[in-house]
Image: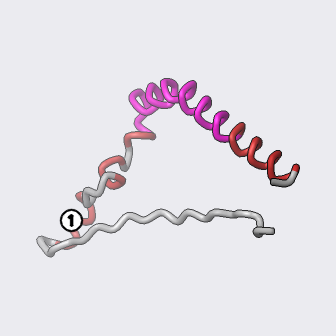
């Protein structure tokens, strides 16, 4: 493996460890905020797949398929 490849591998490991550390340290704060703030609870049912009441009322008993999607874009440098 080249020197650049070895450095890149180490940086990836360091970055992954930093992400885990931030998650472990930050999770209690985020959970507390989610429990005490209405902002985080608002729309939770929709994110869990439940059709909102305002939409059910409009459909007046029709069958519904609720699709919630997220777009994720990954950016990787071109391979050598």
Residue at horizontal 45%, vertical 25%? Answer: 32
In the image, residue 71 above or below residue 7? below
Residue 25, by quadrant, is top right
Give, as a single range, the part of the protein colored magenta. Answer: 15-39
Residue 24: in magenta span: yes
Query: Which image quarter is the N terminus in?
Result: bottom right
The residue lying toward the viewer, choosing from 72 and 2, is 2
- Magenta: main secondary structure equals helix
Residue 12 location (% of width, % of height): 71, 45
Q: Residue furthest front?
A: 1
Closer to the camera in the image, 41 or 47: 47
On the picture, is 41 further left or further right than 52?
right
Question: SS of the residue at dot 1?
Answer: helix
23 and 6: which is toward the camera: 6
User: At which x and y percent is residue 28?
Assistant: 48, 24
User: By what rule are the colours in the image chosen?
Assistant: secondary structure
- What residue did someone put label 1 on? 56
30 to 75, vertically: above or below: above
Q: Is residue 53 left or right of residue 78?
A: left
């Amino acid at each position: 493996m080249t020197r650049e490849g070895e450095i890149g591998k180490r940086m990836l490991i360091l970055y992954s460890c930093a992400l885990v550390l931030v998650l472990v340290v930050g999770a209690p704060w985020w959970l507390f905020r989610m429990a005490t703030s209405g902002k985080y609870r608002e729309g939770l049912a929709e994110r869990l797949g439940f059709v909102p009441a305002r939409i059910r009322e409009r459909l007046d008993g029709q069958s519904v398929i609720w699709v919630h999607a997220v777009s994720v874009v990954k950016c990787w440098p071109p391979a050598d």
